Amino acid sequence: MTSIASLRALASKYQRAMPARLRAYLTARGIPDEVVDYYQLGYDGQRITIPIENRAGDVAFFKLAKDPEDSSDGPKMLASEGSHAELYGWERVLGAPDRIVICEGEFDRLVLEAHRIHAVTSTGGAGVFRREWAEYFAHIPKVYICFDRDEAGRTGALRVGQLIPHARIVELPDAVGEGGDVTDFFVRLGKTPDDFVELLAKARPAPPTPPKLPRRRTAIDPDRTRIERLKEQVPIEELVGRNLELRPSGQVLTGRCPFHDDRNPSFAVYPEGRRFYCFGCGKHGDVITFLRELEHLSFPEALDALERFTSIHGPETPSHNSTVEGEGDPGGLADS
Ligand SMILES: [Zn+2]
């Protein structure tokens, strides 16, 4: 329905709709007008739109940043339908630069670009960096990873460092505070590009990958039909909703992520697609993944737990009210 051309047209339309107050807001957070215009930032009437281009240079989807005047507790960042983990800044990577910074978040990337420092980010947050992206960095002499100063940032940086062996990990100074990022460095602390280059000079190589035993997948016997049936029968919003508070935000439900220290609700549940996605830490998956991660279950254990969930919460089975389990009605409560 939404073709490549129509997404580009949409980007232009949003761009024209960008109110002056949002330009002022972006300027104040280190993204001046020329960067706003160059990267076609816009406004869809609710959120700031950031068109994300794929490797071919087509608009693939939009990241949607919260309007500063939006007082609801919706997530800081959302994405439009069709979103996936994409590298925001392919044109930089493909332009064979001498130096590139992999940072965490679209706005941080734009702040770096505003200071004429080539930068890219994964649209999936600190936790998502695709293995197949790594090879595109192999021929860039200086690759730096500069993620947020928090646990998710440190873990994510190590992971990227293992995928790109010559990359160096940059540590933002104490002064940015716990959870501080590139924007804090430039905007709140008023640092200059020279200060940042000094920081780059102190970057350290990522520790080598720890040896891993090859994983064997044969241990699990995936009963495909059972898996598919459980995914069908357990509405993800109900399963997640039992564990955290969810609020509707357009087509999605959002809440605070149970997998990282989430100060803003960045955990999105897509009932239609039966999946979840965290815009903070990048965790994503279906009902099985959710349960496994949350309760530290093995795959078969998660299936059993989902089975119990369906037996308590539906799906509706013909009721045999007069029959109590164990009373020995042979036909009554047998598994169907
Ligand atoms: Zn998270």
Image (cartoon, helix red, strand yellow):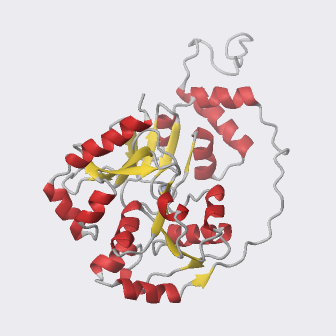
Image coordinates of residue 52 in percent, x first then y, are 42, 51
From the viewer's perspective, is residue 113 above or below residue 78?
Answer: below
Image coordinates of residue 137 in percent, x first then y, are 61, 67
Residue 145 visible? The answer is no
Residue 223 visible? The answer is yes
Image coordinates of residue 219 in percent, x first then y, are 84, 45
| Count of marks placed on residues | 0
Horizontal relation, residue 1 to residue 191: left or right? right
> Hey, which quadrant is residue 8 in on the image?
top left
Image coordinates of residue 188 in percent, x first then y, are 28, 78
Camera-side residue of 330 and 176: 176
Residue at (41% x, 66% y) in the render = 109
Residue at (19% x, 57% y) in the render = 22
Horizontal relation, residue 161 to residue 274: left or right? right
Camera-side residue of 115 and 331: 115
Point out the image quarter for the N terminus: top left
From the viewer's perspective, is residue 317 above or below residue 41?
Answer: above
Horizontal relation, residue 82 to residue 210: left or right? left
Q: Residue furthest front?
A: 95
Point out the image quarter for the C terminus: top right
Horizontal relation, residue 61 to residue 328: left or right? left
